Image: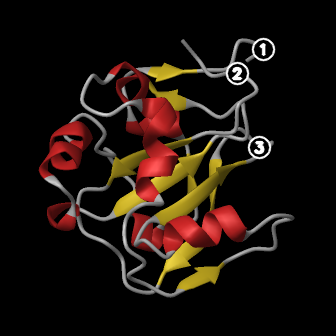
Amino acid sequence: MYPSGIDCVWIAVDQTGMLGAFITAGEGEISLNAIQSTIINFIELEEKILQFPISSLAHLTTSVPYPNEFIAIAERGFFVYDWTDKNRYELVCIPKTPLHLKQLPHQYMTYLQALKLKHSLFQSTTTININLEFDQVIYASHH
């Protein structure tokens, strides 16, 4: 079930079609739909995102020890959030030219239908509480 202790990436879309990537730090909350999907293999998702062409400049919003992963994902048009010890995701890196849902391959559009945020918009939200955005959320076992 939950990839405990593994720093992995999952993605969601906001109401405007902008894309966000969430890096779990091995313990961040994940929408259950992201893990249970049969359309996209959750464990291979980061690798697949990094195969997208670089389409944007990226801007770090905060200082992080190892920024390369965040920058690489934002360069592909995703707003990048990292799990914090405050039990929420915090915006770490912004794409100058955000990718829109309509620009993704069809399988991603289908996958993201079940991963749409209820409230937050990536362009104006610096912290996201996943519990407020999705009906079913999965936690690391120690949570």
What amino acid does circle 2 point to?
Ser
Could you give the CA–CA distance between mark 1 and mark 3, rounded to whole angstroms? 15 Å
Q: Is residue 63 left or right of residue 134?
A: right
Give the spatial CA distance, label 1 vs label 2.
Answer: 9 Å
Front in this rendered view, residue 78 or 69: 69
Q: Nearer the viewer, residue 61 or 65?
A: 65
Residue drawn at x 31%, y 56% as measured from the top left: 14
User: Any mark on residue 142, and which?
Assistant: 1
C-alpha distance separating marks 2 and 3 = 18 Å
- What residue would you read off at disc 2? 4
Amino acid beneath label 3: Lys
Whole-percent x, y for residue 23 in the image: 61, 47
- Quadrant the C terminus occupies: top right
Identify the secondary structure beneath mark 2: loop
| Of marks 2 and 3, the one in the foreground | 2
Residue closest to the eye, 21 or 136? 21
- Image quadrant where one finds the N terminus: top right
Identity of the residue drawn at 31% across and 72% down: 99
User: In the displayed structure, would residue 55 be above or below residue 122?
Assistant: below
Residue 142 as seen in the image, left or right of residue 19 = right
Q: Residues within 10 Å of mark 3 (few under 14, many from 20)?
A: few
Instruction: Give the image location of residue 111, x and y in percent.
Output: 23, 38
Quarter of image, res 122: bottom left
Task: Report if the CB atoms under discs 2 and 3 are less than 8 Å apart.
Answer: no
Q: Quadrant of residue 87?
A: top right
Going from N to C along the chain, the mark reached first, 1 or 3, is 3
C-beta proximity under 8 Å, tags 1 and 2 = yes
Q: Earlier in the sequence, mark 1 or mark 2?
A: 2
Q: Which residue position holds label 3?
A: 86
- Secondary element at tag 3: loop
Give the residue at x 44% y 32%. Answer: 42
